Amino acid sequence: MAEIIKLLSDSVANQIAAGEVIQRPASVVKELTENAIDAGAKEIQIIIKDAGKTLIQIIDDGIGMSPVDARMAFERHATSKISEAKDLFAIRTMGFRGEALASIAAVATVELKTRRENDDVGTHVIISGSEVLSQDPVSCSKGSNFMVKNLFFNIPARRKFLKTDNVENRNILNEVYRIVLAHPELSFLVVCDNNTLLKLSPENLRQRIVSVFGKSLNQHLINLSVETSLINITGFIAKPERSRKSTSEQFFFVNNRYMLHPYFRKSVTMAYDKLIAEGEHPSFFIYFETSPASIDINIHPTKTEIKFEDEQAIFQILNATVKEALGKFNIIPGLDFEENITRDAHLTSKTSVKPPAIAINPDYNPFESTAYNRVSNSPPKNWQSLYSENTQKTPDDFYLPQEKTFLESNQLIPEQNQISSQTKNVFFQLKNKYILTSGKSGMIVIDQKRAHERILFEKFLGLLETRKGVVQKSLFPVIYEPGPDERAVLIEVITELNNIGFEIALIGKDKFEIRGVPGDLTDIDPLKTIEQMVYVLGEVSGSAEMVLNEKIALSLAKTAAFKIGKVLREEEMQELFYKLMSCVNHNYTVDGKKILEIINIDEIEKKLN
């Protein structure tokens, strides 16, 4: 019988490795930018076209490569970072496996132009699908210039399942953030489809954070700094009011390497207990410095999951450090006792203690007329004129006609005809989350948040289609300084938002002014609403199928809908119920969640037997 075990070819092995290392265009940006940093670059340019599918170009001014190194760099497990197994426990570089370039060249066409400082000419290498097409001398600048074209051209399935350009661009930016925040001493230029998204000069860490996430973050940053024999922790956390709906402003770094660590994230979140609302996340930028021998960064191909020797101890240190920082800035309320509160009280056994005396006037009469409290018994002058306008009016002139009730309006009666027409509905609120009322066949249970979300969605969608939103001007306009990815989302939808009643103006390159909100949303926080709307707009599921108006209406509805726990008066519950019944679909939210449930009277009686 013939042997069935075969050795894979290099091209197939590289494609398999690419499946682990190169998951999307953002992975290419990460690997090539980290290589540039390891090469000693001081200035790095990142150029993206068509979300990386057409071109990813990384230009650096690092040490460059010789002709032999330029060719060898594309071989599997070819690396300058380690030479023996023990080097894995002393890694300070960003990359070390030697898989990245081989994996990228297996699924794209890669051009490399590179030159060392003392070389007269550089080297130009072209590789496509792991096949070396050419290697020639070239005149080029010192450093390396990688151009990755037609990513996943030979793996159509992988290319097909890439997300939309907006999503992939956001993933690329997220990878860039992780790198630029770890290296504030370097210069970066990020250009996407000929638009400059980031232009960063060398700066300190606080300035780098503000440069990336906007000047509004600066006033919320709280410094962290602690040194222990186990680990050193530095960086910044944000005040509770900076909390976000997403974790987009949560960053951990160890030895200047970004990492994902849910266990340590829990430590930070616990320190904010009862300081931020449920469902929101604190912002932090925390840097660990420890011995490379005490961590293992070789447990995942992307090197973002890192194992620590003493995780439980670090958990406690981190939690205490964050709590202390919040306490120093009076974020956490505490008992502030004065040290000298009894310093001047010399009490002895012979000291007589008497209760304080209170002066009382038993003859005081509050109704007695005085110079300062005089009530006149005479009527005001010309009092008849107050009523002269109404002398000819009849009672009918003061009659306010009653609005049609829900039961009288055929337009609002649902198809199921579940609402009793004999009795007036009474509404109750359960756990500040559900609305209970009676129906023809039993009890109706309504999720108030989902109901409000459905009502707002249909309202905003109608306003977007008719462009008849009414603006309620703000007395004091609010400034919004979003990050680059949030700015891109807002620029895309700003016209539509203004059509439904917002008034938002771009007053600088990266600054917006919120001058008004829709008339029905006057009780909202404009800045918080826009921030959350931008976040939800980027996270809305089914975005490929939904038109822009629907995405905007849904994101605003999710943002402005009642929060769980809101107490409603009976009139508010009644109004919410009637508006829900007038919706096109009152049974489900836009994303398919059930809004109401009818519990049959027979089912209730059965449970009570």
Image (spheres, helix red, strand yellow):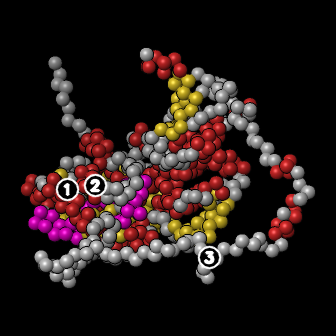
Q: Where 155 sits versus 343, above or below?
A: above
Q: Closer to the camera, 40 or 401? A: 401
Residue 244 placement: quadrant: bottom left
Residue 309 found in image quarter: bottom left
Question: Hey, which quadrant is residue 401 in on the image?
Answer: top right
Mark nearest the camera among 1 and 2 is 2
Instruction: Give the amino acid at mark 1.
Output: Phe
Question: At 10% from the left edge and 59% from the top edge, which residue is drawn?
Answer: 293
Instruction: Please state the extent of the stretch shown in magenta in the rendering.
Output: 225-253
Upstream in sequence: badge 3 or badge 1:
1
Q: Quadrant of the N terminus?
A: top left
Earlier sequence position, callout 3 versus callout 2: 2
Q: Is residue 135 visible?
A: no
Q: Between residues 598 and 450, which one lies in front from this camera angle?
A: 598
What x and y, as percent, mark residue 568? 54, 46
Secondary structure under badge 3?
loop
Check disc 3 and report the residue beneath it: 369
Q: Which residue is mark 1?
A: 315
Name the amino acid, label 2: Met
For label 2, the residue is 270
Does the segment drawn in magenta span residue 231?
Answer: yes
Residue at image coords 69%, 55% = 469
Residue 596 pos. (x, y %): 54, 32
Q: Is residue 227 magenta?
A: yes
